[in-house]
Image: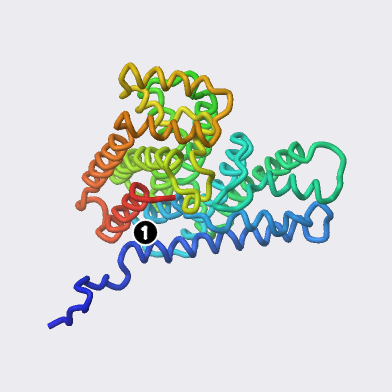
Amino acid sequence: MTATMTTGVAARPPHAPSERLDALGRRCLAEAHGFVNARAREHFSGRSEGALAETAVPDFVAGGKCLRPLFAYVGWRCGQPESDAAIRAAAALELLHCFALVQDDVMDGSTLRRGRTALHTRFARWHEEQGWAGSAPRFGESAAILFGDLFLVWSEQMLRESGLAADQLARGWPHYDAMRAELAVGQLADLVNDARALPSWDTLLDVLRRKSGNYTVRRPLEFGAALAGCGPELLAGLGEFGGLVGEAFQLRDDLLGVFGDPAVTGKPAGQDLRERKASSVVVLAAAMADRRRQAEFAELIELDTVDDEAVARWRELIEATGARDRMGELIRERADKALAAIDPAVVPHHAGELLAALAARCTERDR
């Protein structure tokens, strides 16, 4: 008979899916960080312009959740055994994500990323410390864009040098290219979505899928499965799962952008509201508002500056419409449908366990 713990809570079995994902995430992050460290030393060691780059750029990689590498590697495990080369290939997607984050911070004017100073802000402060002429903010943004470009180049380089065979990489390139193209197109669509002119729910969902849903979940899954040589039936199932979890992930992200705790998210409170983003929670709240609350929405939307008081008013209004609770329901609905799309006759058991754990990680997160 197995002894019962005095707390009454059963001990988790060793190597539970969440623990395996944590270990895999650490390996992917170590691979990505090590690769960038080596490239930063290669290109900037001993150069005046590299005085900050050798530390700031590798630092930017640290602390990531590695969601995209995790999905890519689980896609690989749907058709192939454990592989160090596949882990390196999956980790390359974290550098692609770093490229996206650097650009995103510049476009949004965000000063924080992962609880740390954003890269463009860090370079702007360096410019000031050197006493150089010209605009420090402009310098910081320009430098960050250039280093974002390097992240993009290094992502592809890391993938090419991962150790996977040429025929395996050839199967993955179309999915990698789709991921990069959809990211840029989705970012552009998101850029024109301003809270002053709220899009329809259907339009917003289309942007949401392209900018984040496909990029975060579906394409990485398909990319990894394609590298592994998985067939069309399995790819189709992963695509359905990935699309649903990707939507739920972004809906959750939008909730955190309004109601997230800065101490946990690493971003200022109500960041999406301050940036006047027409996010899903704002669009849904406007649609659910009665006539009186619609007038309040109109007043807030016309504000030139969204300060702390305005953020508090936005939050109260969104809660009053019931949109916050409805968003939670939409997230759960998508998560349930995604899990139902995993056919145990097609998806190996070990991969199915990891997919379920990843779905929970995406939809129940607080950062």
Question: Relative to 294, does residue 216 appear above or below in the rendering?
Answer: below
In the displayed structure image, the side of residue 247 where residue 42 appears, left or right? right
Is 225 positioned to the left or the right of 325 in the image?
Answer: right
Q: Residue at left 24%, top 39%? A: 333
Q: Where is residue 323 in the image (x, y as percent from the top left)?
A: 32, 32
Residue 14, compared with residue 343, is above or below; it is below
Instruction: Judge whether 178 appears above or below 234 on screen.
Output: above
Residue 307, percent across and down?
55, 33
Taking the spot 32% from the left edge, 70% from the top edge, the residue there is 15
Please rate how many residues cluster around mark 1, counting C-alpha atoms within 10 Å: few if below 14, some from 14 to 19, many from 20. Answer: some
Q: Can residue 182 be seen in this view?
A: no
Which quadrant of the figure has residue 206?
top left
Q: Can residue 154 be seen in this view?
A: yes
Visual colour scheme: rainbow
Amino acid carrying label 1: it is Gln
Q: Nearer the viewer, residue 22 or 38?
A: 22
In the rendered image, residue 200, in percent from the top left (x then y), is placed at 38, 20
Classify residue 261 as left or right of residue 339: right
When asked about the image quadrant of residue 99, the answer is top right
Percent x, y of residue 358: 35, 53
Quadrant of the drawing holding the N terminus: bottom left
Q: Name the residue carrying label 1.
A: 80
Point 63% across, 38% down: residue: 106
Viewer-proximal residue, 2 or 267? Answer: 267
Q: How many marks?
A: 1
Instruction: State the residue at coordinates (31%, 56%).
Output: 357
Element class at badge 1: loop
